[in-house]
């Protein structure tokens, strides 16, 4: 996640905050334009195949899902799901293919960009805090005595 928020004023790390904002918006838009339509079309196909409305349990088999371990948003699909054009099975943080999830190349690239932007922001916030700590430590004898 974005654990660096609130640690230093945005004006001190504006560039990395902006990079995260841009990457987050790009990812959000791709999820809306590419992953949500997969969920909607797959649910519609499943309803047409069954000839009736799906139950909540049936609908839950095809849904947008957040994988907290891999820090990723993917479409959850049933086992033995057949990929359609433009879909891929994503890879987890250990590069293992996740066969009960689908995504797109664009979403995966955007997610990677977003994660890298967060990592960079965290490093920059840490650097600023260390710099501030160093400056404060020089003043501590004056403050304590």
Image: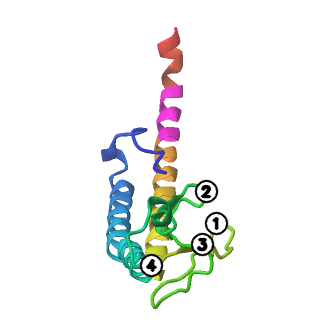
The numbered mark, 3 or 1, whose residue comes first in the sequence reads 1
Q: Is mark 1 on a helix, strand or loop?
A: loop
Q: Nearer the viewer, mark 4 or mark 3?
A: 4
Q: Position of residue 18 (x, y in %)?
A: 32, 58
The numbered mark, 4 or 3, whose residue comes first in the sequence reads 4
Q: Give the quadrant of residue 70.
A: bottom right
The numbered mark, 2 or 4, whose residue comes first in the sequence reads 4
Crowding near pointer 3: few (<14 within 10 Å), some, many (20+)?
some
- For the point 60% across and 72% down, the residue is 100
- Residue lying farthest to the top in this orientation: 145
What residue sits right under mark 2 in the picture?
Answer: 69
- For the point 33% across and 52% down, the residue is 14
Image: 15 above or below 41: above
- Give the Cα distance between marks 4 and 3: 21 Å
* In-front residue for pair 110/136: 110
Q: Is mark 2 on a helix, strand or loop?
A: loop
What residue sits right under mark 1 in the picture?
Answer: 93
Q: Which of marks 3 and 1 is in front?
A: 3
What residue sits right under mark 4 in the picture?
Answer: 50
Label drawn at residue 100 = 3
Q: Circles 2 and 3: CB distance less than 8 Å?
A: no
């Amino acid at each position: 996640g974005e654990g660096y928020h609130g640690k230093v004023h945005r004006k001190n790390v504006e560039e990395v905050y902006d990079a995260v904002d841009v990457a987050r918006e790009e990812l959000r838009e791709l999820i809306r334009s590419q992953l949500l339509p997969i969920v909607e079309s797959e649910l519609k196909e499943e309803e047409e195949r069954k000839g009736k409305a799906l139950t909540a349990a049936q609908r839950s088999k095809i849904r947008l899902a957040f994988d907290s371990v891999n820090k990723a948003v993917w479409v959850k699909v049933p086992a033995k799901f057949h990929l359609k054009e433009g879909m891929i099975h994503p890879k987890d943080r250990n590069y293992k293919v996740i066969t009960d999830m689908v995504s797109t190349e664009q979403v995966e690239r955007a997610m990677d960009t977003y994660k890298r932007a967060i990592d960079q922001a965290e490093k920059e916030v840490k650097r600023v805090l260390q710099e501030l700590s160093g400056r404060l430590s020089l003043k501590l004898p004056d403050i304590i005595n």
